[in-house]
């Protein structure tokens, strides 16, 4: 028998023997209320009633999550292997639910969810760079999503502000259409466009369009995807977070992609921006952005010749032109 239960039983037995509550309370230095409480419990439940009851609340009216929200969190964790922060943003985007990171961790603990195993690949450290002014350099690329479905992506090197559109093919005509959308959607003027050496970017019409709007064309070297790393990473994010949660045969996929683009730019926090969104980063640096006349003034047409897709031929042509000038 527990020592506390034994002591309470002594109170009850002495009260039964003496029939005088005051003398029992004086002997054991307890209040009349305490004596009445345990006598009543003993009368109703016997010795079992002298044990301490659980202090756990019977109901939790202020509980932040319920069974359905718990299942959503567990489903995202199990099927997509997401961490707490990514689950937080996905719940907001897909289900309009807002939970703190602490709440999501409590759900993990409640259901005994194990930690994610992260495979760390130790690679040679490369020198990273960031443009300091929004619009100074826009990285652009095309990603194949499925057969007959290509995503054009452009991302600002400085703010990570992104523009995305789907097309059935990657052609010069679609590239021109995307550049038009890029100019309309970006909240600042594009000074440079950086691409890989895909043929859809080297058409005469595309380069003429860039010259018309005084945008410098800067294709990277062949087999150097790390030079276009920001747009490559943005496309990986699209595959992991957007296309994994939609049906690519959905007729409204383009509309949903537009919603995702807005979420990415204005709501989704970025670790590379210290938790800020691209829109917040843009507003922070808005005062540093040069006006359109300044940008166009720095564009010198004679220094922006047409670029050939074949890198070796292009470099040979530039060396010949340089030799002729000298």
Image (cartoon, rainbow, N blue to C red):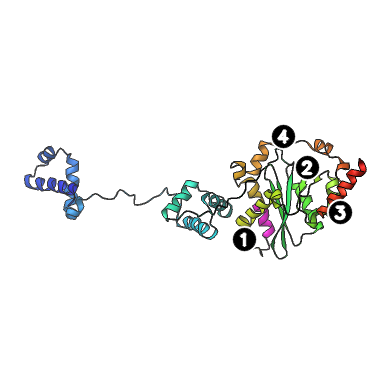
SS for tag 4?
A: helix
How far apart marks 2 and 1 lie (CA) works out to 34 Å
How far apart marks 1 and 3 lie (CA) works out to 36 Å
SS for tag 1?
A: loop
The range drawn in magenta is 251-260
SS for tag 3?
A: helix
Q: If you read the primary sequence from the N terminus, does the residue marked by circle 4 or circle 3 appear first?
A: 3
Number of other residues with Cα within 10 Å of mark 3, as a class: few under 14, some 14 to 19, many 20 or more: few
How far apart marks 1 and 4 lie (CA) works out to 38 Å
Q: If you read the primary sequence from the N terminus, does the residue marked by circle 1 or circle 4 appear first?
A: 1
Number of other residues with Cα within 10 Å of mark 4, as a class: few under 14, some 14 to 19, many 20 or more: few
How far apart marks 3 and 2 lie (CA) works out to 19 Å
Residue 204 - label = 3
Q: If you read the primary sequence from the N terminus, does the residue marked by circle 4 or circle 2 appear first?
A: 2
Q: Is residue 254 magenta?
A: yes
Residue 258 appears at what percent x and percent y?
68, 53
SS for tag 2?
A: loop
Instruction: Please identify, in this view, whether the residue under mark 1 or under mark 3 is nearer the observer.
Output: 3
The residue where tag 2 is placed is 191
**Which residue is more in the foreground, 67 or 180?**
180
Left or right of residue 112, residue 230 in this image:
right
Residue 288 - label = 4
The residue where tag 1 is placed is 246
Number of other residues with Cα within 10 Å of mark 2, as a class: few under 14, some 14 to 19, many 20 or more: many
Identify the image quadrant of residue 273: top right
């Amino acid at each position: 028998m527990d020592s506390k239960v034994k002591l309470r039983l002594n109170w009850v037995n002495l009260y039964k023997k003496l029939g005088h509550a005051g003398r029992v309370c004086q002997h054991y230095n307890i209040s009349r209320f305490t004596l009445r409480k345990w006598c009543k419990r003993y009368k109703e439940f016997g010795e079992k009633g002298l044990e301490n009851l659980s202090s756990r609340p019977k109901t939790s009216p202020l509980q932040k999550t319920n069974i359905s929200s718990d299942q959503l969190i567990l489903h995202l964790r199990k099927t997509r292997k997401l961490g707490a922060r990514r689950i937080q943003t996905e719940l907001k985007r897909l289900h309009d639910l807002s939970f703190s990171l602490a709440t999501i961790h409590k759900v993990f603990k409640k259901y005994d969810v194990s930690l994610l195993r992260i495979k760390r690949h130790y690679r040679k450290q490369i020198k990273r760079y960031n443009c300091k002014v929004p619009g100074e350099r826009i990285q652009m690329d095309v990603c194949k999503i499925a057969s007959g479905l290509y995503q054009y992506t452009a991302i600002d090197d400085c703010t990570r502000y992104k523009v995305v559109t789907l097309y059935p093919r990657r052609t010069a005509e679609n590239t021109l259409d995307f550049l038009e959308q890029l100019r309309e959607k970006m909240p600042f003027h594009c000074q440079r466009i950086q691409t890989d050496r895909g043929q859809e970017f080297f058409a005469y019409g595309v380069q003429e369009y860039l010259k018309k709007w005084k945008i410098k064309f800067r294709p990277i070297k062949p087999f150097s995807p790390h030079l276009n790393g920001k747009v490559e990473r943005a496309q990986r994010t699209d595959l992991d977070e957007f296309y994994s949660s939609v049906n690519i045969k959905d007729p409204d996929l383009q509309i949903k992609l537009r919603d995702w683009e807005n979420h990415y730019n204005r709501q989704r926090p970025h670790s590379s921006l210290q938790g800020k969104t691209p829109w917040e980063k843009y507003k922070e640096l808005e005062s540093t952005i040069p006006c359109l006349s300044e940008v166009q003034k720095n564009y010198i047409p004679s220094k922006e010749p047409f670029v050939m897709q074949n890198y070796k031929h292009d470099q040979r042509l530039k060396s010949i032109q340089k030799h002729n000038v000298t």
